Image: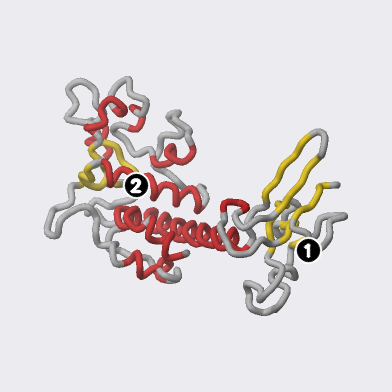
Amino acid sequence: MIRHLLAVVCLAVAVLIGPEIGYVLDLIPGWDTVKSCITNTGHAAGDTIRLLDLQELSQYNGQQGSPGVYLSILGQVFDVGKGHKHYGPGGSYHFFAGRDASRAFVTGDFTEAGLVDDVSGLSPAQILSLSEWLSFYNKDYILVGRLVGRYYSETGEPTEALKQVESAMAEGLELRAQAEADKQRFPPCNSEWSSGKGGRVWCSTQSGGVQRDWVGVPRKLFTPGSSSQRCVCVQSSGPSSSQQLRDRGDLDSPNLQEYQDCPSLAESCLLTD
């Protein structure tokens, strides 16, 4: 599963970080799958990478007389001229033209205060979503160079700010893989509610969109350090996911609680609380 997730963002990572690999990335299990494509930066071997400064980039705003329409994400500059109707004057995304507005891609803040390249303070998951935007632009548009400033030096080398983004992206990738593993271990329950009958939760071999060969029983799963809970289906027989307990599946896992007045091994529970 981790290798599958890594493959999904492989292209995006290659666009983002080029050949320089931070030591943090090497700590991720399965990172070798991605590393093989890191050197593909969108330029053929021997090509000179074009470097633009903020003033030059600002000229590519699609206005009459401008040389074209460019935008930048995390210092990567793309020619989006073929999407002029979207990025040119009057277009829905014209505010991205001629600048690096990385933060706005995640936050949706399209004011001048939000249309900036500074992504500090964003969560690892948000940073990871930026890599998916990079993948989109790399696939549909032309990568023309790098923006000198926050993420690339005057010689086109990654800055410390970009290395921090790399680390956050690696953490986001790990968190996504862990969330997917948790979903496979504890799939969400089916649920229904009506004014006449009240609520009910139940398990099946495909509840929560997770196809499996076991049904499981409903349990409340609590998040450590939080009062939030959600209904999950728990495997009730065989070895546990941790391989430490046998014949009771994951029933003895911490942070699980039975539903009140519901038989312990019932596949369906009425909600009474």
Residue 83 is labelled as none
Vertical placement of 143 versus 170: above or below? above
Mark 1 element type: loop
* Image x and y of residue 59, in percent: 23, 30
| Label 1, residues with CA under 10 Å away: few <14, some 14-19, many ≥20 | some
Q: Name the residue under label 2.
A: 134
The residue under the point 22% across, 52% down is: 42
Is 32 positioned to the left or the right of 193 in the image? left
Q: As displayed, is residue 87 above or below residue 244?
A: above
Decide: marks 2, 1 in contact (CB < 8 A)?
no
Question: On the rendered structure, is 114 left or right of 232?
Answer: left
Q: What element carries label 2?
A: helix
Q: Which amino acid does label 2 sit on?
A: Leu
Residue 178 horizontal/vertical position (percent)? 55, 62
Type of the residue with mark 1: Leu
Viewer-side residue, 188 vs 68: 188
Q: Where is residue 245, by image quadrant?
A: bottom right
Q: How is the image coloured?
A: secondary structure
Density class for disc 2 (Cα within 10 Å; few <14, some 14-19, many ≥20) is: many
User: Mark 2 to mark 1: distance in Å?
Assistant: 47 Å
Residue 257 versus residue 171: which sits nearer the camera? 257
- Reading the image, the residue beneath label 1 is 265
Q: Which of 167 and 191 is in front in this view?
A: 191
The x and y percentages for residue 241 are: 62, 72
* Residue 229 pos. (x, y %): 73, 52
Figure disc tally: 2
Q: Which residue is drawn at 30% across and 63% down?
A: 20
Q: In this view, does 136 lie to the left or right of 261?
A: left
Q: Which residue is drawn at 67% across and 75% down?
A: 238
